[in-house]
Amino acid sequence: MSIFADENTLVVVQGLTGSQGSFHGLRNRAYGTKVVAGVTPGKGGGSLAGIPIFDTVAGAVAATGANASFVAVPRLGAPSAVLEAAAAGIALVVCITEHIPAKDEALLYNLLRREYPGCRLIGPNSPGVISPGKCNIGITAGEIALPGGPVGIVSRSGTLTYQALHELSQQGVGQTTCVGIGGDRVPGTSFTDVLAAFEDDPETAAVMLIGEIGGSDEELAARFIAESMTKPVVAYIAGVTAPPGRTMGHAGAIVSGHTGTAQAKIAALEACGARVARNPSEAGELMVRVVRGLA
Amino acid sequence: MDLYEYQGKRYLARFGIPVGRGTIADTVDAAVAASDELGYPVVLKAQVKTGGRGKASGVRVAADPAEAASHAEAILGLVIKGHTVRRLWVETAAEIAHEYYVGFALDRAAKLHLAMVSARGGIDIEDVAEKDPGAIARLEINPLDGLSASDAQTLTSAAGIGAEAREGVTDVISRLYRCYIEGDADLVEINPLIVTTTGEVRALDAKVTLDDEAAFRHPEWSEFAEAEPDDPRELAARAKGLSYVSLDGSVGIIANGAGLAMSTLDVVSQAGGAAANFLDIGGAADAEAMTDALEVVNSDTKVRAILVNVFGGIVRCDDVARGVLDALGRVQLASPIVVRLDGTHAAAAHALLEPHLSDRLVMAPTMLAAAQRAVELAAGAGR
């Protein structure tokens, strides 16, 4: 099994006729993802590489039964594109759009939560979700992933996610699903949400978590690991030597207390029983040992 | 983007928040002229983007022109937490009856906005936050609901603001929330917000951090960017669309993706070295971006070795290798370069680089090996 996306996921690409949408949307289809529709307002009735284009997500859902959306829309239109998908009943929205202002993300997150609690948003600024061999939504290069599990990956960074997939695949350790939650300040889906899904997924035996400095999502994940997870977790946190932020003022410190630094995150995760690696290769090696130990 | 106090005050004033009268000065003469014009006593305040100015003697009161001159002399050029003071803000001194604190920021864990108000503002607010958190009234604000007038009143009374200032502080809270939301700030903080002996409420200081991602809808922010005396390499990198931060070490870093770049700094440190910079060339990593990045890193005289760390996903390593070779043809490097390419088409990339390898161009199979090699080269070779 896998989480969030599998062989039954039917994907509509919002912005399929744009440069990002067509490049990644068609790559996703070539990987085997069931890309059933595209949405570009004003281009409904047309098609791209055999994929029918609709004016609205609702139209695409009615005609094709799409249940997931890939939002590849520039930032000015991205939040409303996500809301349109949610309003059309889409259960999973993956948004790769970068550079959305934090205020807009906070508004979007709270609007989804209040009006469309059944819709899961991954991103913005997500590299995507891939369940190897079944479904790839987003910008991950499918070739570096290995089907068959048993490792679930969740990460805030794009290239570090690829690095993690690669380290495991090279060692013959497959993945159930790899979820890039994105490094923005208000992600639609947090580490804890993904850890909970992996804990419930019978085919996922262990989880790799890749975090970085800033915010307190890793600390919340650590608490979840201690309280609610039975599966082993290997973690890596980037930014141990990152220069102290140039933010001034005290409000940041008041909000987060001593959380936010790599050291604080590593300490929190270790205290909760996660194995924390010092670099991505070591994370791969640790996970290989964990998986072989489980076998 | 962090604003200087004087810029922050200008920003608050746009939203109708009362601030003191003052002038910016970057020489002793200009500071005295400004003081004369404002009328004594005046406060001369170092303009640096860090806290702790008061404790570092960067804020002084002058009663006459001679004092203004000697204080300006003392503060200009002062180094506060690594920031050199190049500018002063000269403001009419206030008769302070009480100091409060008001701030707004994003609570990332709750994914809500957070208001913080305290009757115990001033330089020790962080201590207050730690030792007596109850002295800071907090309110989480759902952006869908916003901050109502009654929310602002609730905050004022929960913080224990005295009756004489309650109306003024409540008004500032509402205006500051608008500044935070409509002004697209990541952080707005007034510490202290004062009430004067004559009952006037105004911002004595201002800390404002703007959300860089929102710059596209704030053309008025350009005035702030122009005033910034930045590192010349950071400006050059920004002009080329590269994400670059200057650091103190001797290993120049070029990586694709912010996470991998950060991770590269960590691995260099684990190998016993220190990075000269953080540089994320973005996902594409083509010859153009690689040339730009090498030019920026090469212009840094601290750099003794360069480490290129690229993981190919959709970007193919052989394309990156061609980019590196192409860039090497265009840029005369002062330091040896260690290249680590892994991921999509890595074998083809290695084959491309192989004939060009020398003691100036080294290939390494893993991130850690590449970092170790770069650190060795940086320690050994002169420029």
Image: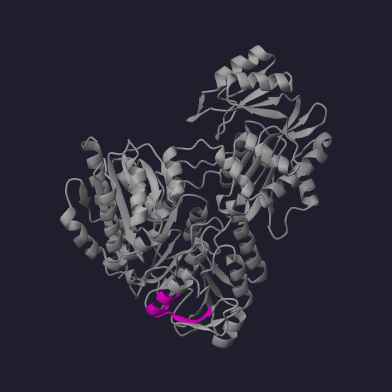
Q: Is residue B374 left or right of residue A158?
A: left
Specify the farthest residue to the top.
Answer: B66
Image quadrant holding the C terminus of chain A, namely bottom left
- Where is A104 relative to A116, above or below? above
Residue drawn 52% across the image and 43% down it: A258
Number of dots carrying numbers: 0
The picture quadrant where one finds residue B341 is bottom left
- Where is B138 relative to A73, above or below? above
Image quadrant holding the N terminus of chain A, namely bottom left
The picture quadrant where one finds residue B284 is bottom left
Depth check, front residue: B191 or B47? B47
Residue B104 is at least partly visible in this image? yes
Residue drawn 56% across the image and 37% down it: B227
- Where is B210 relative to A62, above or below? above
Q: Position of residue A263 (x, y in %)?
A: 43, 45
The picture quadrant where one finds residue A130 is bottom left
Residue A1 is at least partly visible in this image? no
Q: Position of residue B307 (x, y in %)?
A: 29, 48
Is residue A256 located in the magenta-colored stretch of the structure? Answer: no
Q: Is residue B350 left or right of residue A111?
A: left
Depth check, front residue: B377 or A279? B377
| Magenta extent | A25-38
Specify the farthest residue to the front.
Answer: B330
Depth check, front residue: A291 or B59? B59
Q: Position of residue A184 (x, y in %)?
A: 52, 57
